[in-house]
Image (cartoon, rainbow, N blue to C red):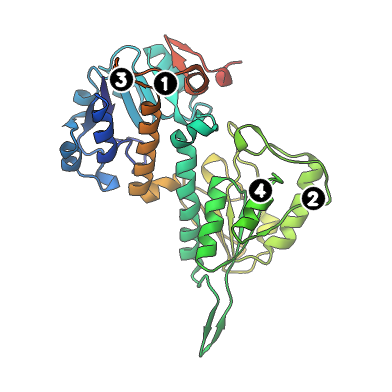
Protein backbone atom coordinates (compact mmCIF):
# COMPACT_ATOMS: atom_id res chain seq x y z
CA UNK A 1 0.00 0.00 0.00
CA UNK A 2 1.72 3.16 -1.26
CA UNK A 3 0.46 6.50 0.06
CA UNK A 4 1.64 9.64 -1.70
CA UNK A 5 1.64 13.18 -0.33
CA UNK A 6 2.09 15.98 -2.85
CA UNK A 7 3.14 19.56 -2.30
CA UNK A 8 0.07 21.79 -2.40
CA UNK A 9 -0.26 23.82 -5.61
CA UNK A 10 -3.22 26.08 -4.84
CA UNK A 11 -2.35 29.76 -4.48
CA UNK A 12 -1.75 30.70 -0.85
CA UNK A 13 -2.00 27.13 0.42
CA UNK A 14 0.64 26.60 3.10
CA UNK A 15 -0.64 23.38 4.68
CA UNK A 16 0.47 19.80 4.04
CA UNK A 17 -1.56 16.60 4.32
CA UNK A 18 0.93 14.62 6.40
CA UNK A 19 3.35 15.28 9.24
CA UNK A 20 6.22 13.20 10.62
CA UNK A 21 3.83 12.03 13.34
CA UNK A 22 1.27 10.66 10.87
CA UNK A 23 3.98 9.26 8.59
CA UNK A 24 5.20 7.12 11.50
CA UNK A 25 1.67 5.99 12.36
CA UNK A 26 0.77 5.07 8.79
CA UNK A 27 4.08 3.28 8.33
CA UNK A 28 3.33 1.27 11.47
CA UNK A 29 0.15 0.03 9.79
CA UNK A 30 2.26 -1.37 6.96
CA UNK A 31 1.96 1.43 4.40
CA UNK A 32 4.81 2.97 2.43
CA UNK A 33 4.77 6.77 2.61
CA UNK A 34 6.16 8.87 -0.23
CA UNK A 35 6.32 12.66 0.21
CA UNK A 36 7.16 15.21 -2.46
CA UNK A 37 10.33 17.16 -1.73
CA UNK A 38 9.48 20.50 -0.12
CA UNK A 39 5.88 19.52 0.66
CA UNK A 40 6.13 20.59 4.30
CA UNK A 41 8.36 23.61 3.90
CA UNK A 42 5.65 26.26 4.32
CA UNK A 43 4.31 24.40 7.39
CA UNK A 44 7.73 24.39 9.09
CA UNK A 45 8.36 20.68 8.35
CA UNK A 46 11.69 19.89 6.74
CA UNK A 47 12.38 17.12 4.25
CA UNK A 48 14.77 15.61 6.80
CA UNK A 49 11.96 15.41 9.36
CA UNK A 50 9.83 13.43 6.91
CA UNK A 51 12.78 11.24 5.97
CA UNK A 52 13.63 10.55 9.61
CA UNK A 53 10.00 9.51 10.16
CA UNK A 54 10.34 6.86 7.47
CA UNK A 55 9.02 8.56 4.34
CA UNK A 56 10.51 8.37 0.87
CA UNK A 57 11.28 11.80 -0.61
CA UNK A 58 11.25 12.61 -4.29
CA UNK A 59 9.71 14.56 -7.14
CA UNK A 60 5.95 14.74 -7.61
CA UNK A 61 6.11 12.21 -10.45
CA UNK A 62 8.25 9.84 -8.40
CA UNK A 63 6.14 9.84 -5.25
CA UNK A 64 2.83 9.45 -7.07
CA UNK A 65 4.02 6.57 -9.29
CA UNK A 66 2.07 3.40 -8.43
CA UNK A 67 0.35 5.15 -5.51
CA UNK A 68 -2.74 3.44 -4.10
CA UNK A 69 -3.77 6.52 -2.11
CA UNK A 70 -2.93 10.19 -2.60
CA UNK A 71 -3.53 12.51 0.35
CA UNK A 72 -3.93 16.24 -0.09
CA UNK A 73 -5.29 19.32 1.63
CA UNK A 74 -6.84 20.70 -1.55
CA UNK A 75 -7.43 18.13 -4.26
CA UNK A 76 -4.68 18.24 -6.91
CA UNK A 77 -5.43 18.60 -10.59
CA UNK A 78 -5.82 15.27 -12.32
CA UNK A 79 -2.67 15.93 -14.34
CA UNK A 80 -0.63 15.72 -11.11
CA UNK A 81 -1.82 12.14 -10.55
CA UNK A 82 -0.35 10.62 -13.70
CA UNK A 83 1.29 7.34 -12.75
CA UNK A 84 -0.98 6.55 -9.81
CA UNK A 85 -2.73 3.21 -9.93
CA UNK A 86 -6.05 2.98 -11.73
CA UNK A 87 -8.80 3.44 -9.18
CA UNK A 88 -6.44 5.08 -6.68
CA UNK A 89 -8.06 6.95 -3.81
CA UNK A 90 -7.52 10.68 -3.52
CA UNK A 91 -8.50 11.95 -0.06
CA UNK A 92 -8.62 15.75 0.12
CA UNK A 93 -10.93 18.76 0.13
CA UNK A 94 -12.59 18.92 -3.31
CA UNK A 95 -15.09 21.80 -3.19
CA UNK A 96 -17.35 19.65 -5.39
CA UNK A 97 -20.12 22.24 -5.73
CA UNK A 98 -17.70 24.91 -6.89
CA UNK A 99 -15.34 22.65 -8.85
CA UNK A 100 -17.68 20.43 -10.82
CA UNK A 101 -15.28 20.22 -13.75
CA UNK A 102 -12.54 18.83 -11.53
CA UNK A 103 -14.88 16.17 -10.14
CA UNK A 104 -15.80 15.14 -13.68
CA UNK A 105 -12.11 14.99 -14.61
CA UNK A 106 -11.50 12.61 -11.70
CA UNK A 107 -14.34 10.40 -12.86
CA UNK A 108 -13.06 10.38 -16.43
CA UNK A 109 -9.57 9.48 -15.23
CA UNK A 110 -10.86 6.56 -13.16
CA UNK A 111 -9.78 7.80 -9.73
CA UNK A 112 -11.85 7.45 -6.57
CA UNK A 113 -12.29 10.98 -5.22
CA UNK A 114 -12.98 11.13 -1.49
CA UNK A 115 -14.19 14.57 -0.38
CA UNK A 116 -13.15 14.98 3.24
CA UNK A 117 -15.45 17.98 3.66
CA UNK A 118 -18.41 15.64 3.07
CA UNK A 119 -17.52 13.63 6.18
CA UNK A 120 -20.83 13.04 8.02
CA UNK A 121 -21.13 14.75 11.39
CA UNK A 122 -21.69 11.62 13.39
CA UNK A 123 -19.99 10.61 16.61
CA UNK A 124 -17.61 8.03 15.18
CA UNK A 125 -16.43 10.42 12.44
CA UNK A 126 -15.62 13.37 14.69
CA UNK A 127 -11.90 12.61 14.68
CA UNK A 128 -11.94 12.56 10.85
CA UNK A 129 -13.80 15.87 10.41
CA UNK A 130 -11.43 18.27 8.63
CA UNK A 131 -14.02 21.06 8.52
CA UNK A 132 -14.29 21.11 12.30
CA UNK A 133 -10.56 20.96 12.96
CA UNK A 134 -9.82 23.73 10.49
CA UNK A 135 -12.81 25.88 11.51
CA UNK A 136 -11.66 25.72 15.11
CA UNK A 137 -8.38 27.36 14.11
CA UNK A 138 -10.19 29.81 11.84
CA UNK A 139 -12.32 31.10 14.69
CA UNK A 140 -9.20 31.71 16.76
CA UNK A 141 -7.32 33.41 13.91
CA UNK A 142 -10.26 35.67 13.08
CA UNK A 143 -10.22 37.19 16.55
CA UNK A 144 -6.43 37.55 16.66
CA UNK A 145 -6.29 39.17 13.21
CA UNK A 146 -9.24 41.48 13.87
CA UNK A 147 -7.72 42.50 17.19
CA UNK A 148 -4.46 43.37 15.47
CA UNK A 149 -6.23 45.59 12.94
CA UNK A 150 -8.48 47.11 15.62
CA UNK A 151 -5.46 48.71 17.25
CA UNK A 152 -6.86 48.91 20.76
CA UNK A 153 -6.64 46.66 23.80
CA UNK A 154 -9.18 43.87 24.42
CA UNK A 155 -9.43 43.80 28.23
CA UNK A 156 -10.54 46.54 30.58
CA UNK A 157 -7.46 48.13 32.09
CA UNK A 158 -7.46 50.24 35.22
CA UNK A 159 -4.32 52.35 35.28
CA UNK A 160 -3.02 55.43 37.08
CA UNK A 161 -3.72 57.34 33.89
CA UNK A 162 -7.33 56.21 33.77
CA UNK A 163 -9.47 53.27 32.72
CA UNK A 164 -9.57 51.63 29.28
CA UNK A 165 -12.92 50.01 28.52
CA UNK A 166 -13.09 46.40 27.37
CA UNK A 167 -13.56 45.85 23.66
CA UNK A 168 -17.01 44.69 22.60
CA UNK A 169 -16.91 41.65 20.33
CA UNK A 170 -20.01 40.28 18.55
CA UNK A 171 -19.89 36.82 16.95
CA UNK A 172 -22.51 36.01 14.31
CA UNK A 173 -22.90 32.28 13.72
CA UNK A 174 -22.12 29.86 16.53
CA UNK A 175 -20.74 26.79 14.83
CA UNK A 176 -17.26 25.44 15.50
CA UNK A 177 -15.55 28.63 14.30
CA UNK A 178 -17.97 30.85 16.17
CA UNK A 179 -17.56 29.00 19.45
CA UNK A 180 -13.78 29.26 19.21
CA UNK A 181 -14.05 32.96 18.36
CA UNK A 182 -16.17 33.50 21.48
CA UNK A 183 -13.74 31.57 23.66
CA UNK A 184 -10.72 33.40 22.25
CA UNK A 185 -12.26 36.86 22.65
CA UNK A 186 -13.25 36.01 26.23
CA UNK A 187 -9.73 34.81 27.06
CA UNK A 188 -8.39 38.12 25.75
CA UNK A 189 -10.71 40.00 28.10
CA UNK A 190 -13.34 41.29 25.68
CA UNK A 191 -17.02 41.79 26.42
CA UNK A 192 -18.52 39.17 24.12
CA UNK A 193 -21.98 38.61 22.68
CA UNK A 194 -23.14 36.19 19.99
CA UNK A 195 -26.12 35.22 17.87
CA UNK A 196 -27.25 32.33 15.69
CA UNK A 197 -30.45 31.25 13.97
CA UNK A 198 -30.33 27.94 15.84
CA UNK A 199 -31.96 28.28 19.24
CA UNK A 200 -29.97 25.33 20.60
CA UNK A 201 -26.79 27.43 20.54
CA UNK A 202 -28.04 29.82 23.24
CA UNK A 203 -26.85 27.54 26.04
CA UNK A 204 -23.49 27.06 24.31
CA UNK A 205 -22.99 30.81 24.14
CA UNK A 206 -23.83 31.24 27.81
CA UNK A 207 -21.56 28.37 28.82
CA UNK A 208 -18.62 30.33 27.40
CA UNK A 209 -19.55 33.41 29.40
CA UNK A 210 -20.91 35.40 26.47
CA UNK A 211 -24.25 37.17 26.10
CA UNK A 212 -26.75 35.53 23.69
CA UNK A 213 -28.53 37.90 21.31
CA UNK A 214 -31.62 36.18 19.88
CA UNK A 215 -34.88 37.03 18.18
CA UNK A 216 -37.62 36.31 20.71
CA UNK A 217 -40.64 37.75 18.90
CA UNK A 218 -40.82 35.13 16.14
CA UNK A 219 -41.76 31.69 17.44
CA UNK A 220 -41.16 28.21 16.11
CA UNK A 221 -37.98 28.79 14.14
CA UNK A 222 -35.16 26.51 15.11
CA UNK A 223 -32.85 26.98 12.13
CA UNK A 224 -31.28 23.55 12.52
CA UNK A 225 -30.32 21.85 9.27
CA UNK A 226 -28.70 18.52 8.61
CA UNK A 227 -25.30 17.85 10.11
CA UNK A 228 -25.54 20.70 12.59
CA UNK A 229 -25.53 23.43 9.95
CA UNK A 230 -28.02 26.29 9.79
CA UNK A 231 -30.73 26.52 7.16
CA UNK A 232 -32.16 29.60 5.49
CA UNK A 233 -34.81 31.38 7.53
CA UNK A 234 -38.28 32.66 6.69
CA UNK A 235 -38.67 36.29 5.56
CA UNK A 236 -40.36 37.10 8.87
CA UNK A 237 -37.43 35.80 10.87
CA UNK A 238 -34.86 37.48 8.62
CA UNK A 239 -36.59 40.85 9.07
CA UNK A 240 -36.77 40.47 12.85
CA UNK A 241 -33.13 39.39 13.01
CA UNK A 242 -31.99 42.31 10.85
CA UNK A 243 -33.69 44.76 13.19
CA UNK A 244 -32.17 43.17 16.28
CA UNK A 245 -28.69 42.99 14.77
CA UNK A 246 -28.85 46.59 13.53
CA UNK A 247 -29.48 47.86 17.04
CA UNK A 248 -26.75 45.68 18.55
CA UNK A 249 -24.05 46.02 15.92
CA UNK A 250 -23.91 49.80 16.26
CA UNK A 251 -22.41 49.36 19.74
CA UNK A 252 -19.73 46.82 18.79
CA UNK A 253 -16.00 47.26 18.27
CA UNK A 254 -15.31 43.96 16.51
CA UNK A 255 -17.76 41.72 14.65
CA UNK A 256 -16.88 38.19 13.52
CA UNK A 257 -19.22 36.59 10.96
CA UNK A 258 -19.05 32.82 10.38
CA UNK A 259 -22.30 31.77 8.67
CA UNK A 260 -22.13 29.19 5.90
CA UNK A 261 -24.70 26.93 4.22
CA UNK A 262 -23.10 23.91 2.48
CA UNK A 263 -23.36 24.01 -1.29
CA UNK A 264 -24.70 27.56 -1.40
CA UNK A 265 -23.38 31.10 -1.31
CA UNK A 266 -22.82 32.47 2.18
CA UNK A 267 -25.89 34.27 3.56
CA UNK A 268 -25.70 38.06 3.82
CA UNK A 269 -25.69 39.08 7.47
CA UNK A 270 -24.45 42.66 7.46
CA UNK A 271 -25.50 45.35 4.99
CA UNK A 272 -23.77 48.57 4.05
CA UNK A 273 -26.41 50.49 5.99
CA UNK A 274 -25.62 48.51 9.12
CA UNK A 275 -21.88 49.08 8.66
CA UNK A 276 -22.61 52.82 8.54
CA UNK A 277 -24.05 52.68 12.08
CA UNK A 278 -20.80 51.36 13.58
CA UNK A 279 -18.29 53.73 15.10
CA UNK A 280 -15.10 54.66 13.29
CA UNK A 281 -12.22 52.29 13.90
CA UNK A 282 -14.43 49.22 14.31
CA UNK A 283 -13.45 46.00 12.55
CA UNK A 284 -15.49 43.28 10.86
CA UNK A 285 -13.86 39.92 10.07
CA UNK A 286 -15.84 37.96 7.47
CA UNK A 287 -14.90 34.29 7.78
CA UNK A 288 -17.22 33.45 4.88
CA UNK A 289 -15.62 35.85 2.41
CA UNK A 290 -14.34 33.04 0.17
CA UNK A 291 -17.92 31.75 -0.27
CA UNK A 292 -19.37 35.12 -1.26
CA UNK A 293 -19.22 36.78 2.14
CA UNK A 294 -21.58 37.52 5.02
CA UNK A 295 -20.73 41.21 4.80
CA UNK A 296 -21.63 43.57 1.99
CA UNK A 297 -18.45 44.83 0.36
CA UNK A 298 -16.01 42.33 1.89
CA UNK A 299 -13.13 41.27 -0.37
CA UNK A 300 -10.94 38.24 0.25
CA UNK A 301 -7.41 39.00 1.45
CA UNK A 302 -7.98 42.75 1.49
CA UNK A 303 -8.86 45.27 4.17
CA UNK A 304 -11.71 47.38 2.83
CA UNK A 305 -12.64 50.55 4.69
CA UNK A 306 -16.26 51.69 4.54
CA UNK A 307 -17.80 54.41 6.71
CA UNK A 308 -14.64 54.32 8.82
CA UNK A 309 -15.05 50.58 9.50
CA UNK A 310 -12.36 48.12 8.41
CA UNK A 311 -13.74 44.96 6.77
CA UNK A 312 -11.43 41.99 6.32
CA UNK A 313 -11.33 38.26 5.69
CA UNK A 314 -8.98 35.63 4.32
CA UNK A 315 -9.66 33.34 1.37
CA UNK A 316 -7.95 30.54 3.32
CA UNK A 317 -7.88 31.32 7.04
CA UNK A 318 -6.38 28.01 8.28
CA UNK A 319 -3.42 28.53 5.94
CA UNK A 320 -2.42 31.45 8.18
CA UNK A 321 -1.72 28.89 10.92
CA UNK A 322 0.07 26.40 8.71
CA UNK A 323 1.87 24.30 11.30
CA UNK A 324 -1.10 23.69 13.59
CA UNK A 325 -3.57 23.43 10.72
CA UNK A 326 -1.39 20.81 9.02
CA UNK A 327 -0.99 18.82 12.24
CA UNK A 328 -4.75 18.64 12.75
CA UNK A 329 -5.57 17.98 9.09
CA UNK A 330 -2.97 15.19 8.93
CA UNK A 331 -4.41 13.59 12.07
CA UNK A 332 -7.89 13.73 10.54
CA UNK A 333 -6.60 11.84 7.51
CA UNK A 334 -4.76 9.30 9.64
CA UNK A 335 -7.83 8.73 11.83
CA UNK A 336 -9.87 8.22 8.66
CA UNK A 337 -7.55 5.62 7.15
CA UNK A 338 -6.87 3.94 10.48
CA UNK A 339 -10.59 3.51 11.22
CA UNK A 340 -11.02 1.40 8.07
CA UNK A 341 -7.64 -0.32 7.96
CA UNK A 342 -7.69 -4.05 7.34
CA UNK A 343 -4.62 -5.49 9.08
CA UNK A 344 -4.51 -8.58 6.89
CA UNK A 345 -4.79 -6.74 3.59
CA UNK A 346 -2.75 -3.80 4.92
CA UNK A 347 -5.21 -1.52 3.19
CA UNK A 348 -8.35 0.42 4.13
CA UNK A 349 -11.86 -0.60 3.14
CA UNK A 350 -14.69 1.92 3.56
CA UNK A 351 -18.07 1.04 4.97
CA UNK A 352 -21.30 2.24 3.35
CA UNK A 353 -22.24 4.99 5.80
CA UNK A 354 -19.06 6.99 5.48
CA UNK A 355 -17.99 5.69 2.08
CA UNK A 356 -21.24 6.72 0.39
CA UNK A 357 -21.13 10.11 2.10
CA UNK A 358 -17.64 11.16 0.98
CA UNK A 359 -17.10 9.24 -2.28
CA UNK A 360 -17.57 11.50 -5.29
CA UNK A 361 -16.36 9.27 -8.12
CA UNK A 362 -15.76 5.58 -8.72
CA UNK A 363 -15.24 3.34 -11.75
CA UNK A 364 -15.40 6.25 -14.17
CA UNK A 365 -18.63 7.78 -12.85
CA UNK A 366 -19.82 10.48 -10.46
CA UNK A 367 -21.57 8.49 -7.75
CA UNK A 368 -22.33 10.91 -4.90
CA UNK A 369 -26.06 11.53 -4.48
CA UNK A 370 -25.48 15.17 -3.51
CA UNK A 371 -23.98 15.82 -6.94
CA UNK A 372 -26.64 14.12 -9.02
CA UNK A 373 -29.62 15.78 -10.64
Would residue 12 appear left or right of 56 to someone viewing this image?
right
Q: Is residue 305 left or right of residue 89?
A: right
Q: How many marks?
A: 4
Of 51 and 95, which appears nearest the observer?
A: 51
Q: Which residue is mark 3?
A: 343
Residue that label 1 marks:
113
Q: Earlier in the sequence, mark 2 or mark 3?
A: 2
Residue drawn where x is 77% and y is 52% of the image:
215
Which numbered circle lies on residue 201?
Answer: 4
Q: Is residue 73 visible?
A: no
Alpha carbons under labels 3 and 1: distance apart: 23 Å
Helix, strand or loop at label 4? It is: helix
SS state under label 2: helix
**Mark in front: 2 vs 3:** 3
Question: What separation in Å lies between label 4 and label 3 (alpha carbons)?
Answer: 41 Å
Question: Could you classify mark 3 by the number of other residues whose Cα lies within 10 Å: few (under 14), some (14-19), or many (20 or more)?
Answer: few
Q: Residues within 10 Å of mark 2 (few under 14, many from 20)?
A: some
Q: Are marks 1 and 2 in contact (CB under 8 Å)?
A: no
Instruction: Report the residue marked by disc 2.
Output: 240
Amino acid sequence: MRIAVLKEQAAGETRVAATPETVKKLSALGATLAVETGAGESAAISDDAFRDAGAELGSAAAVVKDADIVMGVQAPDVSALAGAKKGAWVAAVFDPFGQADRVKAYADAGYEALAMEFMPRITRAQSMDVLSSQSNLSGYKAVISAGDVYGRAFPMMMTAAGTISAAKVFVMGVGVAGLQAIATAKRLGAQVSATDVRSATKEQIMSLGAKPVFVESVEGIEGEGSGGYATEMSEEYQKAQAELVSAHIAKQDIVITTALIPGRAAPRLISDAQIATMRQGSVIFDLAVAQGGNVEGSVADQIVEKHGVKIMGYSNTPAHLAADASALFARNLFNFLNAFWDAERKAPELDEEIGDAIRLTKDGAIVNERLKG
